[in-house]
């Protein structure tokens, strides 16, 4: 769906720029990012990625959004922290797109659009008992269970057959945001896959506790939610894991014309209650693996 622009371009209230000309939340200018973007949740994980760059030529940190840009094997790469949740992905994806596809001086959308390669390196919890902790899992699809994508024109990027089967199986109520299934970028998947990596559908939840079936002092409204996710099968395919960002990354990337893929370290297995004893080592190994695959000529 095309955006209507005025003769004066996108209004100041819609495309918000800082006094130095940088985009509002990320505090970045177009020249500050590369064509390949790695996203991580934790700002402290940015340096865990960029320490493997051959050179780092730019650093910025604003709120939870931290960016390092540099060169690895002659490829310019940026690593950006998003914080937690689909609402933050909404900010990051829209502002990254603005950096490459909107002329900040004229405030108009460029005639020739740029497609970024966006790779999320994250952590996730497994839903199936046969997925071991410390495994690497690539998300073939993101199953949006949080409602953020409902604010966008999603009809051409979703899988209504899968969604209907899931709603029927889980007895999904009409008062909840309806699930949306979005596929990854097959081109990036092909770069990242190997016999070291599992693949499956990743459910993206609205929170960490009740939205993922956890109970501390508050019990989830749907006490069978975890069982419903674990037992669902559509055309022989199961939901393998869940987290809080992937479906938003896939959906917005599809809508904006970018290539996105998410690969996660499995740190918890909800089916058997286990948690990684070597989480930091596992993440470091995943980071090195991903960088090697992305820069392998």
Image (cartoon, grey):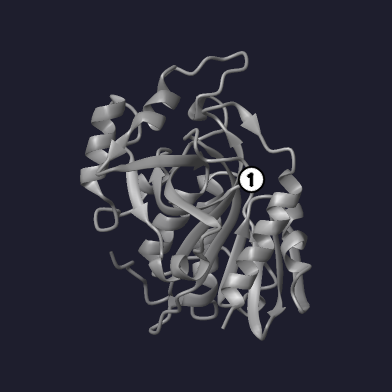
Q: Vertical placement of 130 versus 46: above or below?
A: above
Q: What element carries label 1?
A: loop
**Nearer the observer, 14 or 88:** 88
Q: Residue 128's spot in the image, x, y percent?
A: 47, 35
Q: Where the C terminus falls, by quadrant?
A: bottom right
Crowd rating for badge 1 (residues with CA inside 10 Å; few <14, some 14–19, many 20+)? many
Q: Residue 76's spot in the image, x, y percent?
A: 64, 80
Q: Is residue 157 left or right of residue 14?
A: left
**Residue underneath mark 1:** 134
Question: Does any portion of residue 296 appear in the rendered image?
Answer: yes
Q: Residue at position x 60%, y 60% from top?
A: 39
Q: Where the N terminus falls, by quadrant?
A: bottom left
Please tell me in which quadrant of the rendered image residue 19 appears.
bottom right
Q: Residue at position x 29%, y 57% from top?
A: 157
Q: In this view, does 80 lie to the left or right of 1?
A: right
Q: In this view, does 169 lie to the left or right of 115?
A: left
Q: Vertical placement of 271 versus 293: above or below?
A: above
Q: Residue at position x 49%, y 69% from top?
A: 97
Number of numbered labels in the structure image: 1
Q: Residue 87's spot in the image, x, y percent?
A: 52, 46
Q: Is residue 26 left or right of residue 150?
A: right
């Amino acid at each position: 769906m095309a955006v209507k622009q005025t003769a004066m371009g996108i209004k100041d209230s819609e495309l918000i720029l800082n006094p130095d000309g940088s985009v509002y939340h990320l505090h970045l200018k177009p020249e500050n990012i590369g064509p390949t973007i790695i996203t991580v949740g934790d700002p402290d994980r940015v340096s865990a990625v960029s320490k493997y760059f051959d050179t780092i030529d730019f650093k910025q940190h604003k709120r939870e959004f931290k960016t390092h840009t540099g060169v690895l094997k002659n490829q310019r790469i940026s690593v950006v922290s998003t914080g937690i949740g689909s609402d933050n992905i909404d900010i990051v994806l829209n502002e990254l797109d603005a950096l490459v596809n909107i002329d900040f001086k004229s405030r108009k959308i460029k005639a020739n659009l740029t497609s970024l390669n966006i790779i999320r390196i994250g952590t996730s919890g497994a839903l199936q008992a046969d997925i071991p902790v410390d495994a690497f899992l690539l998300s073939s699809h993101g199953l949006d269970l949080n409602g953020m994508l409902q604010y966008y024109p999603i009809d051409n990027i979703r899988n209504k057959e899968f969604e209907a089967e899931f709603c029927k199986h889980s007895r999904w109520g009409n008062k909840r945001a309806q699930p949306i299934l979005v596929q990854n970028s097959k081109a990036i998947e092909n770069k990242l896959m190997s016999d070291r990596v599992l693949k499956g559908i990743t459910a993206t939840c609205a929170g960490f506790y009740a939205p993922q079936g956890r109970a501390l002092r508050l019990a989830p409204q749907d006490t069978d939610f975890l069982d419903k996710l674990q037992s669902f099968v559509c055309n022989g395919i199961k939901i393998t894991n869940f987290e809080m960002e992937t479906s938003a990354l896939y959906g917005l990337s599809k809508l904006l014309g970018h290539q996105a893929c998410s690969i996660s370290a499995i740190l918890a297995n909800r089916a058997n209650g286990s948690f990684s004893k070597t989480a930091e080592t596992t993440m470091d190994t995943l980071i090195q693996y991903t960088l090697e695959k992305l820069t392998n000529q």
